[in-house]
């Protein structure tokens, strides 16, 4: 059975009392360990689709199944468990809390899903090493460049050993060299850890490095 099944999913919003389909009858099957990229113009529905798969936005119709379970048919606390236990999110913005250090920002996900006692700091240090920020563990976000903040947010997405990473323009504010480093990091986590990736990007060069490439246009999904 596929890890994720998106079945005839539509999301409709009312804009000035007029219904607008942000996503239109999308169906998608994703195997465990897949690495999918979705490209498309702004407003094509990419982020909306990602948020429905991640348990953030409820579809207007259709179903999203994770390991055979319809995530939106479950109680709200079960959906919250799904988000905290199965999903690693990389949003368009780093969204670090300014009053917390880099280490403390990384430890935030463990509040909702504690990991083995005493291992939190070890894991945070290892992830920061993997993204090239070992020396910034006690820094505050204001002391980091935009690209460094982005790398902290990338590391944070892996703190709870997610089965699925949903990445929305995860390298948008990185220089070309660092972008390449982060893509190699993603591939390592995908190949070595079996983490499934769905990545939204405007960068067709990045998309070409993934196992499957899809395109969204006017809310519909197409295979490239």
Image (spheres, rainbow, N blue to C red):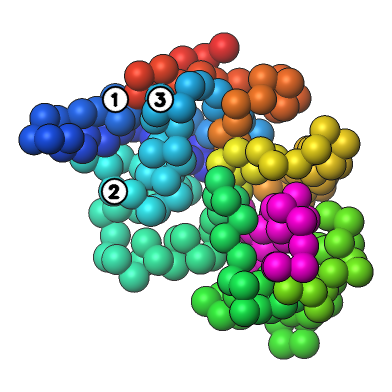
Q: Is the residue under label 3 in contact with that under label 1 (CB below 8 Å)?
A: no
Q: Is residue 107 left or right of residue 57?
A: right
Crowd band around label 1 with a 10 angstrom C-alpha radius: few (<14), some (14–19), many (20+): many
Query: In what element is the residue under mark 3?
Result: loop
Residue 119 in the image: state x and y as whole percent: 78, 81
On screen, residue 149 above or below 118: above
Q: Is the residue under label 3 in contact with that under label 2 (CB below 8 Å)?
A: no
Crowd band around label 3 with a 10 angstrom C-alpha radius: few (<14), some (14–19), many (20+): many
First to last magenta residue range: 141-163
On screen, residue 207 above or below 119: above
What residue is disc 3 on? 44
Q: CA distance from mark 1 to mark 3?
A: 10 Å
What residue is disc 2 on? 58
On screen, residue 15 above or below 86: above
Residue 129 in the image: state x and y as whole percent: 89, 62
Q: Is residue 40 left or right of residue 184?
A: left
Q: Is residue 180 visible?
A: no
Q: Quadrant of residue 17?
A: top left
Q: Of label 1 and label 3, which has the lower sequence position? A: 1
Residue closest to the far top: 224
């Amino acid at each position: 059975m596929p890890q994720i099944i998106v079945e005839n999913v539509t999301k409709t919003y009312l804009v000035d009392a007029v219904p607008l389909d942000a996503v239109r009858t999308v169906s998608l099957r994703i195997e465990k360990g897949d690495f999918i990229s979705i490209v498309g113009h702004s407003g094509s529905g990419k982020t909306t689709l990602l948020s429905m798969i991640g348990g953030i936005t409820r579809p207007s119709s259709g179903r999203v199944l994770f390991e055979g379970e319809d995530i939106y048919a479950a109680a709200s606390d079960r959906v919250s468990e799904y988000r905290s236990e199965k999903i690693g999110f990389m949003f368009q913005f780093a969204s670090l809390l300014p009053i917390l250090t880099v280490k403390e920002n990384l430890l935030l996900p463990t509040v909702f899903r504690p990991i083995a006692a005493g291992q939190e700091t070890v894991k945070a240090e290892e992830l920061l090493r993997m993204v090239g920020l070992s020396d910034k563990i006690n820094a505050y976000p204001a002391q980091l460049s935009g690209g460094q903040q982005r790398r902290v947010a990338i590391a944070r997405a892996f703190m709870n050993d997610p089965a699925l990473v949903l990445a929305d323009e995860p390298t948008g504010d990185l220089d070309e060299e660092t972008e390449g480093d982060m893509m190699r990091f993603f591939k390592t986590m995908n190949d070595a850890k079996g983490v499934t990736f769905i990545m939204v990007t405007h960068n067709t060069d990045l998309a070409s490095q993934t196992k499957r490439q899809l395109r969204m246009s006017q809310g519909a999904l197409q295979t490239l």
